[in-house]
Image (cartoon, rainbow, N blue to C red):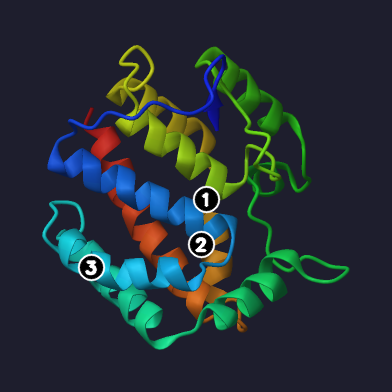
Amino acid sequence: MTEKNNSSLELDTNLSAEDLARADLYGLLALLFYAPPPTELLEKITHFSQEMDSSEVASTSLLQGPWNELVELAKSSQAEEWADEYETSFIGVGKQEIFLYGSFYLTGFLNEKPLVALRHDLERMGLEGSEDITETEDHIACLCEVMRYLIAGEDLSICNLTQQKQFFNQHIRVWVNELFDILESYPHLKLYRAVGELARIFFEIEGQAFDMV
């Protein structure tokens, strides 16, 4: 995502440790769901583990297990394995096995009214799809990237807790557990089952926190 009239999103470098960890985890999930991770990202996950473990978010007992599992998979797997699993599960040849788009889970079809509503909200916030992004805005990776910006962006009129809660509840929370259920039960997944479990627990924590606002 990009800001209108700006080539890139401006991010705040003075975040609290908790918000920095939240933004980093949303950013990591965006990368993992958008495309299979290259070797460099897998190495970064393994090296990033100590920093994440010391953060308030990642040290949450519920997140620790899924995070450790992802780190171990990043250490023990090759980028080619991730690419094969991603291609088979999320792209496919002729028939896509698992959809990563909110509209599909809300309506049973792609490019439906939920996507229109999402685009309206993004426009209201001054955000628009990047030319470098080939997926529609309701792709889980794009939604995670928006959440990262709402946490870490410099424009406090948009990047604040109220906007985070509203966007999360309206465009993520209402459907994403259906995706996670599929990732958990799909028999051919190993690597992305761990990604889904980490995301599920993280989103549950986020939802509980927003409910207290």
> Circles 1 and 2: CB distance less than 8 Å?
yes
Query: As shown in the figure, which amino acid type bears the numbered disc 1?
Result: Val
The x and y percentages for residue 199 are: 40, 58
Against 90, residue 142 (above or below) is above
Q: Determine which quarter of the picture holds residue 73.
A: bottom left
Q: Secondary structure at mark 1?
A: helix
Q: Determine which quarter of the picture holds residue 58.
A: bottom left
Against 13, residue 46 (above or below) is below
The x and y percentages for residue 196 are: 46, 65
Query: As shown in the figure, which amino acid type bears the numbered disc 2?
Result: Phe
Q: Secondary structure at mark 3?
A: helix
Q: Nearer the viewer, mark 3 or mark 1?
A: 3
Reading the image, the residue beneath label 3 is 49
Reading the image, the residue beneath label 2 is 180
The x and y percentages for residue 64 are: 21, 68
The x and y percentages for residue 193 are: 49, 73
Q: Is residue 195 left or right of residue 75?
A: right
Q: How far apart are labels 3 and 2 at the CA level?
A: 23 Å
Is residue 93 something that shows in the picture? yes
Q: Nearer the viewer, mark 3 or mark 2?
A: 3
Quadrant including the N terminus: top right
Q: Is residue 195 left or right of residue 115?
A: left
Query: As shown in the figure, which amino acid type bears the numbered disc 3?
Result: Ser
Query: Badge 2: few (under 14), some or many (20 or more) residues near its Cα, within 10 Å?
Result: many
Q: Earlier in the sequence, mark 3 or mark 2?
A: 3
